[in-house]
Amino acid sequence: MSATDTPKRSMRTPLGRVRNLGAAHSGTSDFWRQRITGVAMTLLMIPVLVIIMMLLGRNQVGAAQILSSIPVAVILLLFILACAWHMKIGMQVVIEDYVHNEKLKLSAIMLNNFFSVAVALASTYAILKLSSGV
Amino acid sequence: MQVYRWTLTMALSIVHRATGIALYVGTLLLVWWLIAAASGPAAYAHVQAFTGSIIGRLIVFGYTWALMHHMLSGIRHFVWDLGYGFKANEREALTWGALIGGIALTVLIWIIAYAIGGGR
């Protein structure tokens, strides 16, 4: 039920009436996830930078060896999943702010979802493949 | 928009978005690199040839700055989310901190990278 067809006399509280009616129709959950993933990436930043430093100047054999170690793989997986989620929400906010044509907006949001999921999945697949040593 | 006096915090708000969009596009480089590492020596050598080139280094340097700036600017937003730092001088200090800190961290990271032999 949307806010417009709510009768004037109602048991619903004002908060209950507007909940989930933001631009994305998903309430504040995206706001909260954006913060969780942001904090996660900030905490993971130093380990991720250390991993990248370890990889510098190495050829594929050396890099694959480091990337296949369990702590390295887990840290990178956590970072990339947080990153993909964070950037999906961030780009959606940008789209909702600047794209006002409804069809164009929905198409852009859809493409944004495709791109973010593809980034997450491709990276995850690559890391798991390196870890399994195939 | 034109009726507002242009302030540092407004400009940095735009920069936060711009760096976010740049990081979004830049994940393609991250994916390319990881898939190449999983594919084999030839594919990985292609990535290294690109990141080792002048253009490649400029892009990765820019990416490092975008990441560091976006992170510090994001921490600034966390401070505001928690309800602190809204006084005029505090807003300015946080914003300058993100701006200068982002550049300083980027330079520091690249100095370390070159020092441990990543510049080869």
Image (cartoon, coloured by chain):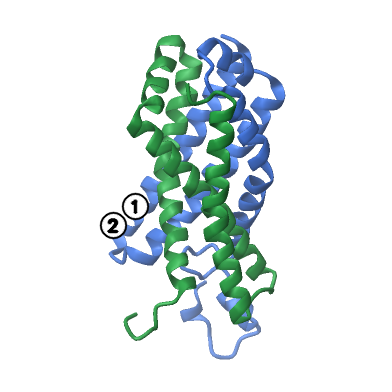
Using a 10 Å C-alpha cutoff, classify the residue at mark 2 as few (fewer than 14 neighbours), some (14 to 19) or many (20 or more).
few
Front residue of B91/A102: it is B91
**Mark 2, secondary structure of its residue:** helix
Q: Which residue is labeled 2 in the image?
A: A104
Q: Colour of chain B?
A: green
Front residue of B52/A23: it is B52
Front residue of A85/B70: it is B70
Front residue of B38/A51: it is A51
Q: Colour of chain A?
A: blue
Image marks 1 and 2: residues in contact by CB distance under 8 Å: yes
x and y, in percent, of residue B74 in the image: 58, 58
Image quarter in which the N terminus of chain B is found: bottom left
**Mark 1, secondary structure of its residue:** helix
- Say if A91 sits above or below A123 in the image: below
Query: Is residue B112 left or right of A70 when viewed as pictured?
Result: left
x and y, in percent, of residue B107 in the image: 53, 44
x and y, in percent, of residue A40 in the image: 66, 47
x and y, in percent, of residue B68 in the image: 54, 49
Q: Residue at x 61, y 21 (%)?
A: A67
* Residue B73 seen in the figure: no
Q: Which residue is labeled 1 in the image?
A: A108
Q: How many marks?
A: 2
Q: Provide the chain ID for the residue under circle 2.
A: A
Distance, label 1 to label 2, CA atoms, is 6 Å
Q: Amino acid at mark 2?
A: Leu
Query: Is residue A31 left or right of B2 when viewed as pictured?
Result: right
